[in-house]
Image (spheres, rainbow, N blue to C red):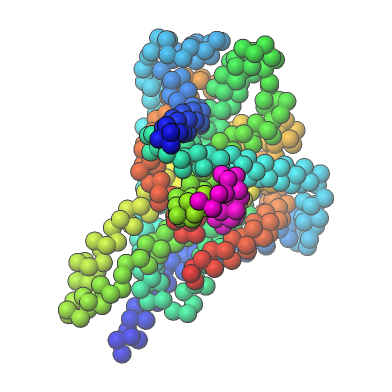
Amino acid sequence: MARMATTRRVAISTAAAWLFGFLIFFPILWMGLASFKTELEAFAVPPSFLFFHWTMENYATVQERSDYLHHAMNSIIIAGGSTLIALLIAIPAAWSMAFSPTKRTKDVLLWMLSTKMMPPVGVLVPIYLIYKSFGLLDSRIGLVFILCLGNLPIVIWMLFTYFKEIPRDILEAARMDGATIGRELIYVLTPMAIPGLASTLLLNLILAWNEAFWTLNLSTSSAAPLTTFIASYSSPEGLFWAKLSAASTLAIAPILVLGWFSQKQLVRGLTFGAVK
Amino acid sequence: MATRQTQFLARSLLTPAVGLLFIWMIVPLALTIYFSTLHYSLLDPGSESFVGLENFRYFLTDPAFLASLQNTLVLVGSVLALTILLGIPLALLMDQPVIGRNFVRLMVIAPFFVMPTVSALVWKNLLMHPVSGLFAWLTSLFGLTPIDWFNDVPLLAVILIVTWQWLPFATLILLTALQSLDEEQKEAAEMDGASAVSTFIYVTLPHLARPITVVILIETIFLLTVFAEIFVTTGGGPGLQTTNIAFLIYSQALIQFDVGSASAGGLVAVVIANVVAFFLVRIVGRNLEA
């Protein structure tokens, strides 16, 4: 009897979970389907779900008409560049706070966190004017710089919580064995830090890729990453659903894959270690 | 000797990060404060003059400010309520023995990774379009008149889009917390004859109190500055119906080019965010000691 009840329970919860999961995922699926329709079919009432004329033409048009690859490249450079620079600055800082903490370390960490809470719109005016006078508007370097600073607190925090978990006994053992600081870094600490570094890198790539306040306000065309490029489809004359869907699918596909790999770290990174 | 050397090394490793963040925080903020006391319009260059608190008076008494403050509160409050009220049952469901749970989790988490401009445009056109959207077709199947989302209930439309983006975050955090709940504790409650409902109220819910607080605070920080979703769907309209504080400041700065007033607004936004940040920093700080 008990066995029966359990099987039934599993069946019900499985069915319910799949149903709700599917509903939540549906808009993305629907967009993916629309990207393979012709413009007429994408707009058709009643909509066709699977039995339409599948075509790849939208993907080709998006590249031809609007140089999709150029904007994708901007996204890669801006997200990748800002993340790498943030890591370069954050690794030593997190390292020093995790391994030689002082009584002020906690305050420094919390202060860094509080800089992340400043609403970007609060400093939009000065940043815009500074960028304008230095010719940084619509430049990749300008966006790399601002996204790097914006994400730096999260990077430092994530690295700090990972480094904190490396057992200090191992360090001391290595020192006893006469390892120099250089050897200690390369042979002992780096291998233990790599998983934490990788997840930090991944999460911040995602955040930078999807950032849509500074990219929308500070870029228009030549430096525009995919967020800004997709926004250009919002104008009434640019309303082509199938092409919008094709461009959107391309824009989110790589990050969706990365995101699925980094679910666990996402919780940790975005809650600053408050929920693990 | 060695310790002093280590300390020096530690400090010099920390300096670049602290210095950069300090400049990043201080310089723009100081400029915002400075601009907020000026009559300064980009359309009228050379006319900058000191006006004291005039910009604040102008910004705070502008009917647009009250409207956008109200919209901000409704947006933040509704999205918080929806993500938590839907997130708890969803997390509980996914914590059950579910076949293919990892795959379900992938589907649930996916919207969080979609860039805001894509989510907003896909919802606005493919789903919420009053004629050709999927929702219009579904409502007509039931013989009802389709809703013209962005004309009749624009703020609700924005709320639904933003809820879709943040529901995965709330669910994932609550699920992570549920999975750390001691299975034995629940079993003990069941052995003592507690019903599923009272187990939920007396065991599970108290355990979720902290993650729920964290979700509320973190979502609030991001929701206070929702921008892209409004920018690509409604442009703040019709009228001021979907203008939140972030969008109001943006339009004063980059559409009306009123630097002084936008700066005053920016400071108001900073103050509001800091009230929330105060509580979050305390919670995270308490966790740091544990």
Asked if residue A184 can be seen in this view, the reply is yes
Q: A194 and A216: which one is in front?
A: A194
Q: B155 and A168: which one is in front?
A: A168
Q: For residue A196: magenta?
A: no
Q: Residue B289, relative to residue B183: is it above or below? A: below
Residue A147 horizontal/vertical position (percent): 47, 51
| Residue located 51% across and 19% down the image | A240
Q: Residue B78, relative to residue A124: is it above or below? A: above
Q: B186 and A107: which one is in front?
A: B186
Q: What stretch is highlighted in magenta?
A: B191-213
Q: A127 and A255: which one is in front?
A: A255
Q: Residue A274, relative to residue B193: is it above or below? A: below
| Residue located 34% across and 57% down the image | A196
Prevalent SS, magenta region: helix
Query: Quadrant of residue A156 in the image?
Result: bottom left
- Seen from this angle, which residue lies furthest front? A1
Q: For residue B192: magenta?
A: yes
| Residue located 40% across and 72% down the image | A97
**Left or right of B97 in this view: B128:** right
